[in-house]
Amino acid sequence: DVKVTQSSRYLVKRTGEKVFLECVQDMDHENMFWYRQDPGLGLRLIYFSYDVKMKEKGDIPEGYSVSREKKERFSLILESASTNQTSMYLCASSLSADRSETQYFGPGTRLLVL
Amino acid sequence: AQSVTQLGSHVSVSEGALVLLRCNYSSSVPPYLFWYVQYPNQGLQLLLKYTSAATLVKGINGFEAEFKKSETSFHLTKPSAHMSDAAEYFCAVSYNNNDMRFGAGTRLTVKP
């Protein structure tokens, strides 16, 4: 089974702090994704990566950056956390860029910014 | 542009009743369609997907969905709801794998 793990289930941070969310997948998947989930809005794509050191902006990249130094690991960085970044963050991975591919999700990190 | 609309943010059914969760899509190319389920405090899990083979797709836990091109729909059904089906359900359309569009979600409540 594909396993996608996220470093924290719950995080509480202060406004202005730098926040790191880490995601690891164990199935040698090419693609990795970071989504943000908010009630009534579904999932919105922040960034995705299709290869090591490669990244593309999604729909809502402002205030976020990412890093993929190794194939299995994809990090989301909030350079200076703000209260409007309080949300559930979901990481996903998929085998390839074929559009029939299933995305496999981690359990999510619920971030509260005070 | 590819998008999905889920009709009804909340659906409530009695245990043993039919479950029907609605999803309509728009896509400029033949769509690939997915249903995911999210149980409380968990990530999303694939229920089923349509990738241009059979129009009636069977998934896990007794769920199925029918692709209807004429109606641009991909509604999710289960003949008899179980308490364990209580969760949030997301419909998604894939234009390419780097552009999967999710609906806003439908929260299913199952009453005893």
Image: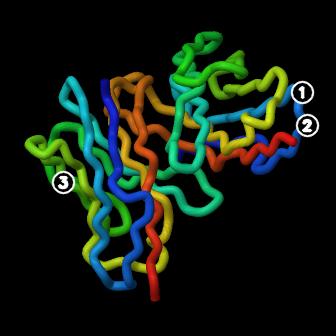
Foreground pick, B53 / B68? B68
Dot 2 and dot 3 within a common chain: no
The residue singled out by tag 1 in the image is A16
Chain ID at mark 3: B
Q: Residue furthest bottom?
A: B112
Foreground pick, B23 / B33? B23
Badge 3 crowding class, 10 Å Cα cut-off, few under 14, some 14 to 19, many 20 or more, is some
The residue singled out by tag 2 in the image is A14
- At 37% from the left and 41% from the top, the residue drawn is B92
Dot 3 and dot 1 within a common chain: no
User: Which mark is nearer the camera, 3 or 1?
Assistant: 1
Inspect the image, locate mark 1, and give the three-letter code of the amino acid beneath it: Gly
Image marks 2 and 1: residues in contact by CB distance under 8 Å: yes
Inspect the image, locate mark 3, and give the three-letter code of the amino acid beneath it: Glu
Distance CA(mark 3)–CA(mark 1): 48 Å
Distance CA(mark 2)–CA(mark 1): 6 Å
Task: Report whether B78 appears left or right of A28.
Answer: left
Secondary element under disc 2, as helix, strand or loop, is loop
Distance CA(mark 2)–CA(mark 3): 47 Å
In terms of image quadrants, where is residue A70?
top right
